Amino acid sequence: MLARTALSFFLTTTLLSLTSCKDPVALEEPITQAQTLGGQSISAATLSNGRQMYVRHCRACHGFKGDGRGPSSPGLRPAPRDLRLATYKFTRMEDGTELPTDAALTEIVSQGLHGTAMLPWGDIQEDALSDIIHYIKTFSPPDEGWRDPDKEVVAPIAISEDPWKGKDEDAIKLGRKVFHGKAKCQSCHPAYVTKKKQWEFLTAYADDPRDALRDDMYQPIKQESAVYMVEDKAQWQKPPDYTWDPVRTLSGSTDTKRDLYRVIGAGVNGTAMTGWKGTALKEDELWAVAYYVDSLVAKRGTPAAKKLRDRLNNQESWAPPAPAPEVPEEAEAEAVKADG
C-alpha cells in the first residue's frame, strides 16, 4: 500500500512538473522587427507565432537552428532537411534553383513526403502553417537563400491539358517506350522491360545506344548529392524503384498522374533528375511517361510487381548485336566518289 501511494505521488508530481514547464520558445528573445524574406516583408508577430509553432511541431527533426539536427534526427533516414540551405527537392517549380512559392511549400508540408519521417501536417490550422512557412525562411544566412536579394520566387510549373484522358492503354504503351528509349530513365531508375525490348526502344531514337545499357539495369543507381549536407557530409540518395519504393510526392495525392507530370516535368532539385518539360519531350510524351509511371506505382505491393520482377529475372539470355565494322576513311571516300 505504501509503495502504491509513493508511486502515485511520484507520477502526480512528475506530471505537474512537466505541465508547468515553459514552452521552449519562452527562452528565446522575442522577435520585435519585421524581416524581408524572399522579397516579402514578414511582420514580427507572424515570425514570433511561426517560431512557436515550429518549435512545437518541427524542432524534433529539423532542430532549433533549422540545421536538420534535431534530437530525433540521428535515427532518421533520409535525414531531415537542412532548412538553412533554402533548397527543396519537390516544389515542382519551373526553375528548381530559385525559391518556391509559399503555396508550394505549404502543399509539401501539409501532404508530407511518403516513405520518410515527414508526415502530413494537414491538421495544423492554415494560419499557423503559413506562419511556420515564413519562419523557416529566417534560417537562411545573410545574403543567402531567402535573404538573398537577387534570388527570385518563381512560378510553379504550368500543367497542360491531359491529352490521354480515356486512352490509358495508349498512353501507357507510349510512356513505356519513351521511358526506356527517348528519356532513358533507366539510366538512374530500374528498367521494367527485357533487355531485348529495351534495345528495341533505344534504337527507335538512336542508331547504336550501347552506352545506355547497364549490367545492373534492374537496380536503381545510388547517387551522392553535395546539395544536401548533414554536418558537412554529402548524403547518398537512391531513385525510387516504382514497383517497390513509396513515391514521396504522392502522399495524400488525389490525382497521381497530374502530380507525376509535375515532378517529372519540373525535375527533382539537387539530384540527377532534371526537368523534362519544355526540353526533349513533347507534352503528349511527358503525359504518357506520367501514365506509365503511375501504372508501375499501382503495382507496388501486389502480385503483379512480383510477377514482373520474376519475368525480368528469368528472361532469356540476350546481348546487343555486334556493332557494324568501321569503314576506313579511304574506302569511304572511294565509295562516295563511285556514287557520283
Image (cartoon, rainbow, N blue to C red):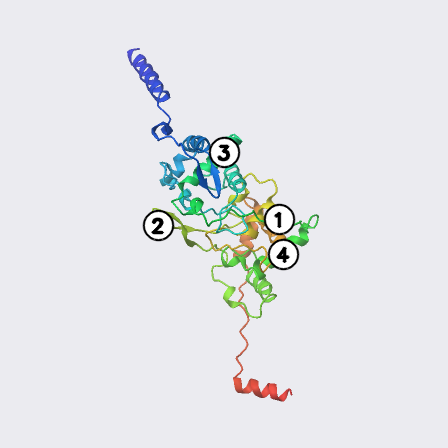
Furthest-right residue in view? 166
Q: Spatial distance from mark 3 to mark 2, Cα to Cα?
A: 30 Å
Identify which amino acid the numbered label 1 is placed on. Ile
Residue on which the image places disc 1: 159
Residue on which the image places disc 3: 129
- Depth-wise, is mark 4 or mark 3 nearer the camera? 3
Other residues around mark 3 within 10 Å, as few (<14) / some (14–19) / many (≥20): many
Q: Which quadrant of the figure contains the N terminus?
A: top left
Which is nearer the N-term, disc 2 or disc 1? Answer: 1
Q: Which residue sits at x=37%, y=39%? A: 73
- Secondary structure of residue under mark 1: loop
Which is nearer the N-term, disc 4 or disc 3? Answer: 3
Q: Considering only vertical position in the picture, is 332 above or below 44? A: below
- Depth-wise, is mark 3 or mark 2 nearer the camera? 3
Q: Which mark is residue 233?
A: 2
Identify which amino acid the numbered label 3 is placed on. Leu
Q: Which residue is at the front of the view, 303 or 273?
A: 273
- Secondary structure of residue under mark 2: strand
Which is nearer the N-term, disc 3 or disc 2? Answer: 3
Q: Which mark is residue 268?
A: none
Identify which amino acid the numbered label 2 is placed on. Lys
